[in-house]
């Protein structure tokens, strides 16, 4: 065939098309007549239950352009900012770390600071970077070219203070305000949800939102001062659809507050940025970000804005919820999957958290690996070259649509209730997230959700208690020597700007940022899914001795091997020492070994049929020992359970048992933890 002939002929003409019906017939045959739409439907736990495959026919009801567009800041079709978080607790060291990151491939910086009220602290305290004054921020940003490097301040409701300091620094350096890019994580909705009270009177908060946006729309239009911090929902155990639905509800309430105060919708839109976490559900996370752009398009069209001229700014950060203390290097595999999902999904900026940041101060190695993961995706995998790389995948397009539909329904429910503030006051948001938390925790406890190295496939020789260190420092807010601030400014940022120019510290203006009130509403809090298993194992490490488990493999080789492996895996989750012999010839040999080794726990491992003879014999012998071990049966033969309990079996371990609760009982019996 000539080259010209091959170009004019379809590569697939010799392959006849296969209809959906024909595919379904084959699937039904393989499933022996079962309905694949029931048997193979994915119970994601994320608010949707997709089918195992989709075809072009399923795209007929999707009426939208593909690929899903995003705003581009340069010629690369899918470029993103490689954002590096700075973890140093000293201003000078943080500046060095920031410049080092920029020299080694990062092109944006992320600084973290939280203001909070601690018992005994008059003005509150600072967690993270101790930025207390204008001079502190100037030292932090020393020799960082602000016109070229985007800055991101993860500073919550302390953000207005940092915004004012940044404005002062820009003026001091005589920089072009049009060239300075920054985002801030100011989110009063998350503050209310986490603390159970408003940071200030609700009307004052709404006025602050307007003042902040008005100031920056006029003076620093490339800075996004308002944040929608959806990371909080994710890291508190919310589903993907809840994360998106509440994020859109927060964005809508911002837009309503601003447009009600006669700010243009364009200025309101430009003030916002979204911060999402990226979990390890690869395809769902890709679809989540694509769905976010669809939801944003719907939202701003409802406010009369042009979606093409007002694209959402989406930042992605690897999840904290699924990161483990034990076998911590597996976290690098998790962040690789997550960062790839974020890049493919079209994040505008991306933070890969170091694999160890949740349990100690990250070191040069963990920070470098996190940075290089993004550089590989960009420089070696070329994911920045293709617009919406996931477009054209029927599966991801369908997931995108389903997630968007469910999230939009959640958003509409919140709007019907009166907005996100009102839904939090009523406890609706808390109830929904806590329901999701409960389902996730139950799946983890029963090992339906696996964390490698923590609730499955543990490393028996690993000890982590000595590796745990402080992740952030806490420092008291300090007032300035002369706190007499002269200002007649009504705008919050103008007032703060003048105050910091007069050498005021944050403590001097704390009353303009916070009213540390008492809890009035229900709260939810971020946590890590694996942490309850980790707490059990840490308790074992800190105990004066490590319990010993002796497996007793007897009889049928297949059953004894499988159940002994299950036993070793289960007790390994608590950090116990496992003695796992190949097998015993008979019950007498097993009993002799129990007497000789004196284990804390003895586990009979055999088949249900052989248990009928083995259990009474071994249980009787164990009961006569001076220090009998806890006697355990691997398996749960329902009809014989009561009889075995009477014989002396203390516990049963089996597939789908609540492993967490089972291990807690062992810890209590062994006096490792209290009742």
Image: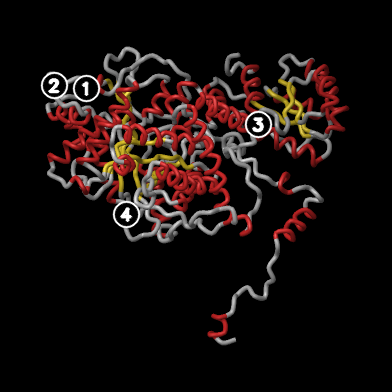
Q: CA distance from mark 2 to mark 3?
A: 58 Å
Q: Are marks 2 and 1 in contact (CB under 8 Å)?
A: yes
Q: Where residue 409 sits in the image (x, y, percent)? A: 54, 37
Residue bearing mark 4: 73
Residue bearing mark 1: 509
- Between label 3 and label 4, give the one nearer the viewer: 4
Kind of element beneath mark 1: helix
- Between label 2 and label 3, give the one nearer the viewer: 2
Query: Mark 1 or mark 4, which has the lower sequence index?
Result: 4
Residue pictured at 48% horizontal, 24% vertical: 524
Q: Is residue 634 left or right of residue 172?
A: right
Q: Quadrant of residue 649?
A: top right
Front position in the image: 41 or 618? 41
Q: Relative to 13, does residue 5 appear above or below in the rendering?
A: below
Q: Relative to 662, does residue 122 appear above or below in the rendering?
A: above
The tag on residue 446 is: 3
Q: Quadrant of residue 273?
A: top left
Front position in the image: 624 or 226? 226
Q: CA distance from mark 2 to mark 4?
A: 40 Å
Residue pictured at 54% horizontal, 23% vertical: 539
Kind of element beneath mark 2: loop
Q: CA distance from mark 1 to mark 4?
A: 36 Å
Query: Mark 2 or mark 4, which has the lower sequence index?
Result: 4
- Between label 1 and label 3, give the one nearer the viewer: 1
Q: Residues within 10 Å of mark 4 (few under 14, many from 20)?
A: few
Q: Are marks 2 and 3 in contact (CB under 8 Å)?
A: no
Front position in the image: 639 or 430? 430
Residue bearing mark 2: 485
The tag on residue 116 is: none
Which quarter of the figure is the C terminus placed in? top right
């Amino acid at each position: 065939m000539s080259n010209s002939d091959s170009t004019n002929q379809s590569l697939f003409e010799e392959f006849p098309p296969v209809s959906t019906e024909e595919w379904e017939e084959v699937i039904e045959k393989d499933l022996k007549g079962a309905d694949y739409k029931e048997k193979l439907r994915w119970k994601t736990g994320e608010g949707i239950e997709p089918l195992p495959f989709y075809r072009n026919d399923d795209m007929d009801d999707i009426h939208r352009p593909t690929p899903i567009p995003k705003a581009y800041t340069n010629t690369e079709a899918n470029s993103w900012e490689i954002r590096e978080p700075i973890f140093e607790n000293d201003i000078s060291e943080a500046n060095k770390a920031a410049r080092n990151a920029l020299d080694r491939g990062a092109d944006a910086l992320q600084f973290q600071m939280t203001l909070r009220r601690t018992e005994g602290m008059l003005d509150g305290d600072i967690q993270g970077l101790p930025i207390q004054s204008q001079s502190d921020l100037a030292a932090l940003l020393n020799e960082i070219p602000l016109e070229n490097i985007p800055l991101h301040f993860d500073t919550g409701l302390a953000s207005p203070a940092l915004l004012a300091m940044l404005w002062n620094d820009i003026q001091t350096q005589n920089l072009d305000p049009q060239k300075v890019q920054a985002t801030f994580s100011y989110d009063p909705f998350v503050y209310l949800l986490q603390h159970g009270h408003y940071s200030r009177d609700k009307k004052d908060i709404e006025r602050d939102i307007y003042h902040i946006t008005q100031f920056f729309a006029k003076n620093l239009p490339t800075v996004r001062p308002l944040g929608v911090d959806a990371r909080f929902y994710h890291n508190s155990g919310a589903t993907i659809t809840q994360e998106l639905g509440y994020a859109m509800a927060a964005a809508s309430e911002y837009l309503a507050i601003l447009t009600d105060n006669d700010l243009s919708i364009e200025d309101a839109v430009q003030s916002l940025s979204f911060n999402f976490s990226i979990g390890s559900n690869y395809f769902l996370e890709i679809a989540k970000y694509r769905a976010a752009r669809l939801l944003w398009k719907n939202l701003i069209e409802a406010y009369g804005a042009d979606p093409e001229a007002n694209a959402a700014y989406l930042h992605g950060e690897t999840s904290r919820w699924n990161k483990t203390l034990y076998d911590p290097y597996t976290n690098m595999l998790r962040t690789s999957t997550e960062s790839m999902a974020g890049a493919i999904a079209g994040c505008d900026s991306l933070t890969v958290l170091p694999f160890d940041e949740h349990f100690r101060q990250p070191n040069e190695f963990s920070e470098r690996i996190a940075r290089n993961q993004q550089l590989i995706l960009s420089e070696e995998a070329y994911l920045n070259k293709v617009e919406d790389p996931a477009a054209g995948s029927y599966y991801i397009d369908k997931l995108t649509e389903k997630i968007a539909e469910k999230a939009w329904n959640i958003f509409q429910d919140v709007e019907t209730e009166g907005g996100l503030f009102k839904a939090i006051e009523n406890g609706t948001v808390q109830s929904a997230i806590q329901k999701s938390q409960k389902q996730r925790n139950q799946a983890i406890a029963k090992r339906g959700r696996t964390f490698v190295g923590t609730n499955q496939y543990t490393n028996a020789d690993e000890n982590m208690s000595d590796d745990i260190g402080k992740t952030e420092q806490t420092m008291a807010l300090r007032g300035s020597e002369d706190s007499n601030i002269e200002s007649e400014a009504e705008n919050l940022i103008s007032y703060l700007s003048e105050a910091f120019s007069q050498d005021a510290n944050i403590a001097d203006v704390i009353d303009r940022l916070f009213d540390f009130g008492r809890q009035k509403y229900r709260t939810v809090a971020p946590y890590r899914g694996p942490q309850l298993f980790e707490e059990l194992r840490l308790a074992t490490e800190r105990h004066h001795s490590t319990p010993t488990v002796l497996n007793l493999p007897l009889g049928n080789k297949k059953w004894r091997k499988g159940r002994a492996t299950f036993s070793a895996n289960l007790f390994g989750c608590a950090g116990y020492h496992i003695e796992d012999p190949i097998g015993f010839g008979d019950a007498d040999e097993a009993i002799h070994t129990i007497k000789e080794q004196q284990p804390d726990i003895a586990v009979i491992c055999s088949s249900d049929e052989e248990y009928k003879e083995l259990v009474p014999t071994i249980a009787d012998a164990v009961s006569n020992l001076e220090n009998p071990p806890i006697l355990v049966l691997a398996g749960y033969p329902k009809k014989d359970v009561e009889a075995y309990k009477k014989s002396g079996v203390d516990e049963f371990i089996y597939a789908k048992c609540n492993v967490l609760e089972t291990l807690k009982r062992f810890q209590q019996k062994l006096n490792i933890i209290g009742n």
